[in-house]
Image (cartoon, rainbow, N blue to C red):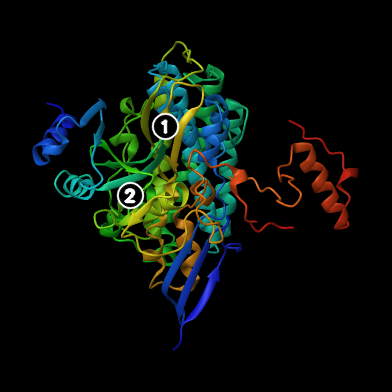
């Protein structure tokens, strides 16, 4: 039988972000595959070289919409190491608290996406409902549901009050109860197990050889977690277990993420109980002394690494970042090949991929007119109202204000 | 003797050219300067004898007349060796590390696209991360590169 070539992406309903896969099918099986990346490269590393450290903090936070705190903390840790700044312990604890809440938010989001990809939309509805709980907590602590912007050089911007601690603990209690239910589902629900078992297999050797990272690696029996191995923030003082699993398939990845949620709740409780009193930030000069540092961070999707070189001015010489998905994509063809076409969406989703942070901007300049394609907020608003008007829907008549 | 010191001792014992080239900056961070001709044997030893089996990424930098490359390799204990090497811009060739670290393809393609390095031994393949129709000889992470350098039109919606 001849091979059928199926392109998936760059724009495809099964992909949440632009990336393209070429699948060579023999019958229903994927005989070979390859992946093309780079559709969302935003040139952030280049932009960082022209920005001040303060501006970069805001830019780096926007590398990813989900793990924004991961990127910002990883970057800031490297800069603070170069500047030889000691962040007050309370500041580190607050950063750790946000980091774990972000992991909870990310893993619950993933669980929903995974449910959706296998036609288990009830799970999607449930876990996204629960995700609202943690997002409300984030909004309460930082003022934002995403892009929390809690970090500043030398510490954090906002303190955590006793009343807020109470609310976080209450939310964690609710979430823990629900997560336990999800773990039961993952271990006992036969339809789910049969759908995920042996799908997207990645052997321990391949995971090791191709640098799989985060829950992907841990579901292939690689006992690796940057929080424990190369501790940053307050993790050296916090007891927690690194979850591994020997299924080496999508089921294993689901188990690892579900159980990691429980560990995150433990860490959040520990952080709240043992948060030291005192200052939340130290003073950092605008100019950072010359030097370089390499920081690692266990983001929800795997290991995030940042390298920063400073040249003594208020702008960095070089900022290099590598998001976890790039590490995990090296093994994607391994997982797709030999599997069914129908499994492709869940196998891709099981990486918990974040292509936009894997790619990093080029602002498009029209050569003929010299006009740049950069819109400010007002411009964007006007453009969208016009666009919808042409579609026959007049949004300018709506005067609905967001009530908080 | 700390673990970091044991590692630098093992490196200098094996490779005499590393004498005085190893530097421990803090717990779990070691920096090593290597000539580009010795990089593969050094990485091979670090991976197979010292257990540095994770290549976190490769950083490329534009430093005056040279391109600088830093291979960030890590072991199970969380120790990172940052292996630094150089190549002049007039001859920006480094050897591929795919023989040692098989997951390094994207990292090396990125060096080729963004910095204009030539990675010797890297198999032909698609660009990463720049598009296929990106003009030749334009490497955005070179310090002298500016957006205005793009003379060839890139596809836009208009």
Work out whether residue B15 or residue A63 is closer to the camera in this orientation and state it.
Answer: B15
Q: Position of residue A394 (x, y in %)?
A: 89, 50
The secondary element bearing badge 1 is classed as strand
Q: Chain of mark 2?
A: A
* Residue sticking out furthest to the front: B90
Q: Quadrant of the C terminus of chain B?
A: bottom right
Same chain for labels 2 and 1? Say yes or no.
yes
Quick check: B101 above or below A47? below
Residue A336 in view of the camera: yes
Q: Categorize mark 2 by other alpha carbons within 10 Å: few (<14), some (14-19), many (20+).
A: many
Above-or-below relation of A336 to A127 = below
Residue at the spot of label 1: A308
Q: Nearer the viewer, residue A98 or A61?
A: A61
Outermost residue to the right: A397
Front-most of A260 and A316? A316
Where does the image place residue A333, in percent across and percent down from the top left? 40, 65
Residue highlighted by disc 2: A218
Label 2 vs label 1: CA separation? Answer: 28 Å
Total labels drawn: 2
Residue B143, relative to residue A368: is it above or below?
Answer: above
Residue occupying the point 20% across, 32% down: B21
* Residue B125: mark: none
């Amino acid at each position: 039988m001849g091979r059928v070539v199926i392109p998936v992406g760059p724009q495809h309903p099964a992909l949440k972000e632009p990336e393209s896969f070429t699948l060579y099918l023999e019958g229903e099986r994927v005989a070979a595959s390859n992946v093309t990346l780079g559709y969302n490269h935003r040139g952030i590393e280049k932009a960082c070289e022209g920005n001040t450290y303060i501006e970069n903090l805001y830019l780096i936070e926007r590398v990813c919409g989900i793990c924004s705190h991961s990127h910002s903390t990883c970057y800031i840790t490297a800069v603070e190491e170069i500047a030889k700044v000691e962040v007050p312990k309370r500041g580190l604890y607050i950063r750790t608290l946000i980091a774990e809440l972000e992991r909870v938010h990310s893993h619950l989001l993933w669980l929903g996406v995974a449910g959706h990809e296998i036609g288990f939309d009830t799970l999607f509805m449930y876990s996204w409902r629960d995700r609202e709980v943690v997002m409300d907590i984030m909004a309460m602590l930082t003022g934002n549901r995403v892009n929390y912007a809690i970090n500043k050089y030398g510490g954090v911007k906002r303190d955590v009050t006793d009343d807020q601690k109470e609310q976080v603990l209450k939310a964690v209690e609710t979430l823990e109860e629900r997560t336990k239910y999800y773990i039961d589902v993952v271990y006992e629900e036969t339809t789910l197990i049969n759908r995920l078992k042996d799908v997207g297999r990645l052997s321990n050797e391949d995971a090791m050889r191709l640098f799989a990272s985060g829950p992907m690696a841990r579901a292939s029996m690689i006992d690796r977690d940057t929080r424990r191995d190369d501790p940053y923030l307050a993790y050296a003082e916090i007891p927690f277990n690194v979850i591994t699993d020997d299924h080496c398939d999508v089921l294993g990845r689901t188990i690892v993420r579900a159980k990691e949620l429980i560990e995150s709740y433990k860490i959040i409780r520990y952080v709240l109980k043992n948060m030291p009193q005192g200052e939340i930030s130290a003073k950092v000069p605008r100019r950072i002394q010359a030097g370089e540092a390499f920081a690692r961070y266990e983001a929800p999707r795997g290991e995030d690494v940042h390298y920063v070189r400073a040249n003594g001015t208020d702008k960095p010489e070089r900022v290099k970042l590598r998001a976890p998905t790039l590490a995990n994509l090296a093994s994607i063809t391994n997982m797709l090949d030999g599997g069914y076409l129908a499994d492709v969406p869940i196998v891709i989703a099981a990486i918990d991929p974040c292509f936009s942070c894997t790619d990093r901007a080029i602002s498009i300049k029209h050569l003929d007119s010299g006009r740049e394609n950069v819109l400010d907020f007002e411009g964007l608003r006007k453009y969208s109202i016009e666009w919808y008007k042409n579609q026959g829907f007049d949004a300018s008549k709506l005067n609905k204000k967001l009530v908080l | 003797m700390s673990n970091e010191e044991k590692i630098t001792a093992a490196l200098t014992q094996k490779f005499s050219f590393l004498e005085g080239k190893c530097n421990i900056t803090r717990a779990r961070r070691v920096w090593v300067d290597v000539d580009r001709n010795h990089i593969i044997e050094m990485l091979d030893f670090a991976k197979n004898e010292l257990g540095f089996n994770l290549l976190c990424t490769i950083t490329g930098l534009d430093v005056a007349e040279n391109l600088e490359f830093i291979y960030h390799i890590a072991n199970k204990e969380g120790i990172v060796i940052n292996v630094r090497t150089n190549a002049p811009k007039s001859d920006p060739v480094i050897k591929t590390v795919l023989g040692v670290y098989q997951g390094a393809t994207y990292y090396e393609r990125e060096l080729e696209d963004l910095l204009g390095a030539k990675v010797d031994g890297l198999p032909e393949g698609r660009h990463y991360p720049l598009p296929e129709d990106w003009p030749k000889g334009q490497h955005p992470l070179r310090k002298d590169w500016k957006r205005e350098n793009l003379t060839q039109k890139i596809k836009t919606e208009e």
